[in-house]
Amino acid sequence: SNDAELIFGTVIDNTIKDLIKITVIATGFDVPKKHFARRPTAPISVANIDNEDILDIPAFQRVRSDK
């Protein structure tokens, strides 16, 4: 594009002998955003808890104790 901004730099690395490395960084591509249709969400049911004290124990520990 005629609007491109090019920044050029060089580095001499004598350790790579007869090789050349090229790094290209390209940014700023205007990609149209995808629009997703929202799906209606179903109501979430909450289970009744007989003993609320069990909630003081982290879930991962409760799961381990069930096994």
Image: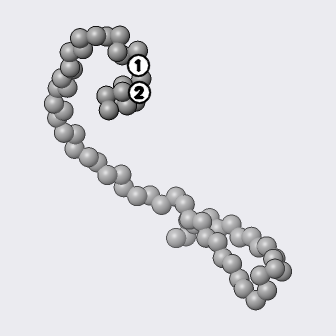
Return the residue nearer the eye: 25 or 66. 66
Return the residue nearer the eye: 22 or 64. 64
Q: Quadrant of the C terminus?
A: top left
- C-alpha gap between disc 1 and disc 2: 7 Å
Q: Which residue is mark 1?
A: 57
Above or below, 40 relative to 57 = below
Q: Amino acid at mark 2?
A: Gln
* Rendering quarter of residue 46: top left
- Crowd class of label 1 (few under 14; some 14 to 19; many from 20; radius 10 Å): few
Q: Which residue is mark 2?
A: 61
How is the protein colored in the picture?
one colour
Residue at 64% x, 68% y is 6
- Residue extending farthest bottom: 18
Residue at 77% x, 82% y is 16
* Rendering quarter of residue 42: top left
Residue at 34% x, 15% y is 54
**SS under mark 1:** loop
Q: Amino acid at mark 1?
A: Ile
Return the residue nearer the eye: 8 or 41. 41
Labels 1 and 2 touching (C-beta < 8 A): yes
Residue at 22% x, 39% y is 38
Number of the label disc, if any, that sits on residue 39: none
**SS under mark 2:** helix
Percent from the top left, x then y, of residue 4? Answer: 57, 66
